[in-house]
Image (cartoon, grey):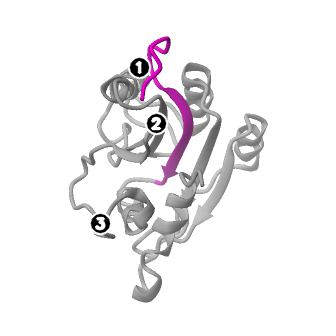
Amino acid sequence: MRRDTQKRPHMERALFVVGKQNAGKSTLLRQMFVDRRLGTDGAIPEASRIKPVALSPERCLVIRCASPHERKETLRRFFDKVERDMERVSDQFWRFNYACALQPEAENKMPDLITICKKFDAKFAPERIRVILIDPRQDGRPGSRLAQSDVDELRSLSVEMAIIDAHRSTPRYEYSNGIFLADFFDFA
C-alpha cells in the first residue's frame, strides 16, 4: 500500500554487482531467484528483463541485469530508468530496492563506480548500498580489482563491499552466490 503523501517509493537498498563485460554479473543477479524468499519456485529466469519482485506487501525489488556501461547509457539516462522503475511500482509499493550490474571503470558514456555510488546516493538516498566485486570471473580469469584509495573512498561513503568468486567450476555450489546476494534483501 502506497502512502498518498509520497510521490515515489523510498529507496531502501541498492546492490551493485560489479565486473567487466562477461564477468558473470547478470548470471549472479539471476541466480538470486534460487532463493524462494523472492517468491519463486527456485527457477532462474533466462531473460535479462525481470519483472519487479514483491518482497512484502509494501516492499519490492527491481533487478536490472544489463550494465548501463554496456548499454552505452549516460548517468542521467541510467538514473532516469531507475526513476521510471520507481514510478512504475509506486501505486503498489512504497519501499523500493534495486539490484543492477555495473562495470568498475568509466566506459562508453558512464562514469566509474565511485562516481556512480556518490551520485546514486545523492539522488536516491538509499539506506544502504552494497557493492559486490566479481573475482575471479565466471570463466576463472582474474576479475576487477579496485585500488586501495577507491576502496577507502567507497568506505567513506558507507558503501558495504564484498568480493564474490563467480567461477563456475563446482556445480554443487553453483547457486550459493545467488543466495548470498538475495540475503541482502531479507528484511525478516
* Relative height, residue 75 to residue 56 (above, below): above
| Residue type marked 1 | Arg
Earlier sequence position, callout 3 versus callout 2: 3
Considering the numbered disc 1 on the image, is that residue within a helix, a strand or a loop? Answer: helix
Q: Nearer the viewer, residue 97 or 167?
A: 97
- In this picture, residue 61 sits left or right of residue 162: left
Question: What numbered label is drawn on residue 166?
Answer: none
- Residue 46: percent from the left, percent from the top? 22, 61
User: Residue drawn 53% across and 46% down?
Assistant: 15
**Residue 168's x, y, as percent?**
41, 79
State the residue at coordinates (40%, 57%): 38
In the drawing, what numbered circle is on residue 76?
A: 1
Most foreground residue, 12 or 67:
12
* Residue 27 image-quadrant placement: bottom left
Please tell me how crowded label 3 is: few (under 14), some (14-19), or many (20+) other residues with Cα within 10 Å. some
Query: Which of 87 and 26 lies nearest the eye of the viewer?
Result: 87
Mark 1 is surrounded, within 10 Å at the Cα level, by few (under 14), some (14 to 19) or many (20 or more) other residues, namely few
Q: In the image, which disc is placed on residue 44?
A: 3
